[in-house]
Structures are given as C-alpha cells and as structure tokens.
Image: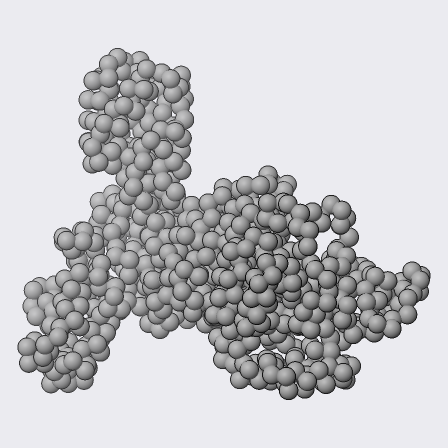
Amino acid sequence: MKRAAAKHLIERYFRQLTEGCGNGACANELCASCLGFQPLDHNTAAIRALELYKINTKLCDLHPSAAFPDNNSAEDTQPALLGDRHGKMTDNLFPPREDFRDVHYLTEEKVYEILSICEGKKDYSPLIRVIGRIFSSADGLVRSFRKDKEQHPDTKEQRKTHQAKDEDKDEDDKERTTAMEQESEASASMEGATGSTENRLGPVEVSLDVEAVRRVYDRLLSNETMESAFLNALVYLTPNVELDLTYLDVYDTNPDYLNIFVIVMENSSLHSPEYLEMAMPLFCKCMSKLPLPALAKLTRLWSRYSVEHIRRMMETFQQLITYTVISNDYDSDSLVNDDEAVVAATKCLKLVFYANVLGGDLDTGHNEEEEEEPPSESSELTLQELLGEERRNKKGLRVDPLEKELGVRTLDCRRPLIPFEEFVNEPLNDVLEMDKDFTFFKVDSESKFSFQSCPFILNACTKSLGLYYDNRISMYSERRITALYSLVQGQQLNPYLRLKVRRDHIIDDALVRLEMISMENPADLRKQLFVEFEGEQGVDEGGVSKEFFQLVLEEMFNPDIGMFTYDESTKLFWFNPSSLENEAQFTLIGIVLGLAIYNNCILDVHFPMVVYRKLMGKKGTYLDLADSHPVQYQSLKELLDYEGDVEEDMMITFQISQTDLFGDPITYDLKENGDKIPVNVDNRKEFVSLYGDYILNKSVERQFKAFRRGFQMVTNESPLNCLFRPEEVELLICGSRNLDFHALEETTEYDGGYNKDCRIIKDFWETVHSFGEEDKRLFLQFTTGTDRAPVGGLGKLKMIIAKNGPDTDRLPTSHTCFNALLLPEYDTKEKLKERLLKAVTYAKGFGML
C-alpha cells in the first residue's frame, strides 16, 4: 500500500512538472501551469519529481479541466465522468478559465451571485466550472461556507490582507507536508487562522455554516447538469483526501479539514446509483481514515441533526452496502470482509449509529456496580499459565474506541431516534461467513475487519452464531486443559460438566453440585453440560439438559417457594423482596440462565425487560416500572401529570409501605425522616425517582446480586455484553413466541422412507396447521423440548420426521435431543390427528426420550 501511494505521488509531481495542474491562475513555481515556468524534458522532470517527493513539497490539486488524477485511461473514464446523469455528453461543462478565476472558495452569497448571472444569460457553464473547481479541492471546501466572518474574508480590505499573506506562503515549513493544497499561498494563512479558532470551538461545533450548505444544495441539485458537476468533483476530490488522511496528519494541523465531510454528506443525492457506483465507495474509504477525535466530533455534530437528516445518512450507507453486496459474489475464498467498499461503508454507518444513540433518550448513569472477583488461585489456572493457555479476555472485554471516546454505550440509550432494527443489513447477514468473521474478531482483529466490531449491523441470529462459536471453542479449550492437567497430575479428571440429580430432589442436588463447582473452580461451568437423572437410562445429547432446565425452573418459580412474585396482569415474575431463601438459591437461577445461553438451550422464563437491562449493567429506573410493575407506574405517572395541589390533595410522604411474605405491612423511608417530608410539586420528580430505585434496585439488592453473580460465573468471558442488547439477550434465553409453522415445514427433513410428497406427510402438515395456538405450542414442546422458537424463528429449527413402522395404535414419539418426531404411517388423517393430539397433550414424562 505504501509503495503504491509513493508511486502515485511521484507520478503526480511528474505530471505537475510536465503538464501542470490546469489552473491558469496557478502561482506555484513548481507547476507547469504557472506563468514563467521553464519547461523541463521528461528525464529532468522525473529526477525533479523524485526530489520533490523526498521533501514532501506541496502539490497543486488537479484542475477539473486538466488530466485525470490516476493511471486509468482518460478515454475509458472521461465519458462517464463528464457526462450528465443520463450518460449524455455536455459540451461546455467547463467554460474558459477566465470565468470567476479569482473565486477560490464559496459563500452562499457568492453562489447566488454567480447563479443569478448564469440565469440571466441562460448559460450555467460558469457556475458549473466554479462548482467543479471548488468541490474538487480540499482547500476550497475547507474555506467555503464559513460562519466565522473573521475566518472568511468577504470585504475588499480583508481580501487584500489575505492576498498579501499569500505571498509569504513559504515561511511555514510544516505546511509543506500537506499533499493536496490547490492554492498553497492561501492555505498557509487560512490554516494558521483556523488552527486558532478550533480551540474556541466546542466538541460539537464546527466553523461551517451547515444551514447555508443545505440551502445551496437545495437550489442547485434540481439542475441535472449541476448534479453531474458535484459528482465529478467528488470523484476528483477523494483520492487526494485519502492520501492526506492516510499519510499526513492534516486534521491535527487543520481541524477545519472535517468541514469537507460535513459538506459532502449534506448532498441529498448521495444515494443515487451514480454516486453509489462511482463516488461513495471512495468517499467512505476517506471518511473511515479520519482520526478518532475527528470521528467522534463528526458523530456528535450529526447527533444534533433532525431524525430526517440522520435517517437519510443511514439509508445512504445502507444502500451502498446493499448495492455492493448484491452486485458481487462472495464465498469462503472471497469474503465480504475483504470488500473495501462494504467495510468502509460499515465503519461510516457506525458514526450514524452512535449519532442516533447520542440523539436519543440517554441514561448514562444508573449503572450497576461491578463486583471485583478475586483472582482464582486454583492449580488449573497455574497450569494454564504454564501451558500458555491463559484465560481469554483476562484483561476484560474489548471496548470500542469510538464508544470510549464518546463516553456512551448502546445500553445507555433507552429510545434511539431511529429504531436499532433499521441499522441491520439483511443482505450482508446472508453472505457473511460467520466462522471466518469470528476468527477475525477473536484472533486477527488488527489486520482483518470483523463485522462483530459493528454488531448493530448484524441480526440476532447471526450474532447468536458467533456466540455459539465462542462457547464451543471455550468448551473445547476447557476439555484440552483438563486433558493436559490429567497428564501432568496423573489423575483422570472429567472434561465435561456432569450433573447427576434425582428428580424428587433436583434443586438440592443441583444446588450442592453447582455451588461446589463455583467455589472450587468456576471455570468448570464453561465445560460442556451433561445431565444424568439417577436411576434412568439415557445419554444426554441435549434433550436431557432441556428437561433438567425445565424442571429446575418449574421448581424455582413455584409460588409456594416464594422466591419470585407473579403478576397476573403481565404474566411476569419478579424477585420477592421478602424471600426467605438464601442467596445460593438465586445464584443457582443465575447459573442456570448462563448455562442455557452457553449450551444453546431455550428456557421458559418470564422476566420483565428490566431484569435483562440489570444483567447487562444498568439499574432499574422509574421508566422500567411500566412493564414490571404497571400499576405502580401508572400511579406515579398520574402523580407527575397532576395539575392540582399535590401536597394537599394526595397527602403523600417520602415513606412508603409494602406487605411482606406473610401479608404484614412494612414501611421504608425513601429519605431520612421520610414520613415527615410531604410530596409536593417541587419534589415529586425526586419522589418518583427514589420510589423506582427502591422497588427495582434496593428492595431486591441481595437477591439480584446473587442472581447476577451466578449469571456472570458462566458468561463473564463471553462476548455477550459487547454483541447483544438486553432485548436480544432475552431472545437468546427465552426464544421467540412468534411461531411460523410454514417456515418449519420448509426446513423439515425426512427419514426412514418418508419425503415431503408422501400422503401421510401432507396429512400431517395439514393437521398441524389446523391446530390452535395452544396445541401448536404443545406439539413444539413435545418434539423439541420447548414451546419457543429459536433465535431467527422456526425456520432455523432443523426438525426430522422419521417413519416408525406401519399403521398401529401406538402414539407418535420424539427424540427432543435431535428434534426428531417418530411417526407411524397411520391409515387415515383422522387417526393421525387423534393419535398426535393425545401424544402432545399427555407428553410430560412420557414420549420424550
């Protein structure tokens, strides 16, 4: 890459010395377009070009009327570049150089002045030429549409002052490192000025008048020929800007360089096919090379835009990704990760995503305290260090640099300006080789781009596949470490997490075993789970584990135990603040949830969303009461909206009361001496905040900390936190309640002599589709061990229907480990329906192998 860039720069120096930049007013003494320049033969020019490259001499920007900036044949590309949007040639796209040659940057007034002259003559060539020259020049764009009058000389006296400064262009040696300055004499004075103003600008402010840029675009883009001028100028601009950002610290020396990207992104035609094909891939590569402070500033600026503007930018990058993906063929040898256009557009989309987050409803506080776990001193960890197998992510989960620079997380946003789902690109998900992408994410992140570093663009199904790979690799790693440890110690250790439990003592057995593991060596929780019910035959290939989880949850969530309360209106469980159970019981529930994710099992749990937010690190607030405690939420909302005398009419204090497990009232002061502090109009927001904090955090602090500790024992080394949002974690644990049996029919496979055209198979699917919602769930429970669809829907579930003999009175059976249904070949459709319904209705403890 560096060799190619050096070659490109030397060629530009050579062309500048032999052909010039094409600007008749050029004052660069090292350019053939400058008056008084002595012509050089090609050999002398080549030697001189090498010398200029070594000392980083300034280059003129190629004037739009000059030769093309790359090595491609002008004959091949010129018709496409100089034609209008319909491919027709424009005869006078660039009129004589004498027109407005003293215009080196644009203001809104100057554009309208030239436009007025052009409209009077019915000839837009002068304006097109100015647009082409300014918008293809980095310096021209940086100086254009400035809102700071001191930086933008408009009066004749100011222009004379700047022209005088232009003659001293060689005084600043640092400016010689800039590789694309069209008018070096102007840029030296301008960059000195802009560097001083940047210190006066806030982290969101820019020296650009964005509204003026929008008005100019609105006036000019209605003209198709003018639109072609913008397109052509952007094609000329991007190669030089990319070189500047890649090899020169242009943003550090001139922070107003960011204005280029702000101006270009205001063009409402960027999503058109011409831009997507010719200009946007190059422009996205330029933008992705901006330094981190510039990316953060651009993100903060965009976060202040309206929803319509943010959505337009989001759709522009999404369309570029989609257009590129569907226009190319990808496979295991030609990965989408290697497509520079897709990668650059995804990096640019990340800026819009975080702008969407910053512009939404943020809650950067209310974070759960992280528990500092003491380092394990077990012999296994010591052996791992000796074997070079130290824990993955031992230094903590990776943090996105842009996220850290902005000081905000996706989790901090309660409601973004644009729904997160709109940032998912399905065509990209369809072609992504997740096994390769996962390798780049975990091993080769420095040299290879992984889309998991931009998880917002991936759907939950794709991310769950990445999590699956991570979990499986962790299991194999634990197995390997155990084998090596056995060789060193001479003991035979179990490479799996084996639980042997009794059905009638399942909680006690599971609790004792898992508690011992968590105390002795929590790493064993990351081994592959195998469950055995005492006194029962069978090998756990997944089905026994499903039943174990199901039985544990049924026992734990039993209202008679009192660990959780159940709300009939929401059908959701919540932690019982008066529970008499010890913390170990809640830790066990957390471990079970973590093991379910780790072992790819779906659980029948019913928690409000605030539980998953708290698991991800956010405390509950008043707003979370809406789905966890809807009655209290409605009362508090009415309190906030009440327009009367709150203190006199409601007579509420900062002391609240609840009932304990035995129905006895208990009181709690939200503030010291809360019973003596009345709630009024001035302090009602504080009351509501403290009430929500008590209900969701303080009253269940003991129970939830134990629950979260158990969950993190299994998932603390997983990329769960950096890939998934709370609603996606719920989907991982609980699956989807939306059941599309037609999608299941499409993906079902057949064995033992059946195929999709068999009479009984057709009868079977007609029967299943005729079932009611409850019977469908019973059938799914009978066949797979859960009544939920996996992440991605039933279409992702691989069910097998196998022939189980001829017509008989026997009921269908199932192997839940393999999602297999063993179906006899019943003679009639009626008998099939009767036998199937009886099997699924009485399936618990029967027919599930």
Please indicate whether residue 395 sits to the left or right of residue 162 in the image: left
What residue sits 47% from the left and 53% below the top? 315
What residue sits 59% from the left and 53% below the top? 225
Q: Quadrant of residue 254?
A: bottom right
Q: Quadrant of residue 448?
A: bottom right
Residue 831 lies, with reference to residue 35, above or below; the image says above
Instruction: Name the spot of residue 221 as percent of width and height, x first.
Output: 53, 57
In the image, 477 versus 219, the foreground residue is 219
Would residue 779 be visible to someone looking at this image?
A: yes
Would residue 584 be visible to someone looking at this image?
A: no
Instruction: Name the spot of residue 769 as percent of width and height, x first.
Output: 26, 28
In the image, 626 versus 419, the foreground residue is 419
Q: Quadrant of the N terminus?
A: bottom right
Please indicate whether residue 291 sits to the left or right of residue 788 in the image: right
Instruction: Name the spot of residue 523 as percent of width and height, x first.
Output: 45, 57
- Residue at the farthest front position: 121
Residue 679 lies, with reference to residue 783, above or below; the image says below
Residue 718 lies, with reference to residue 549, above or below; the image says below
Q: Quadrant of residue 503?
A: top left
Please indicate whether residue 548 sits to the left or right of residue 340 in the image: left
What residue sits 75% from the left and 66% below the top? 23
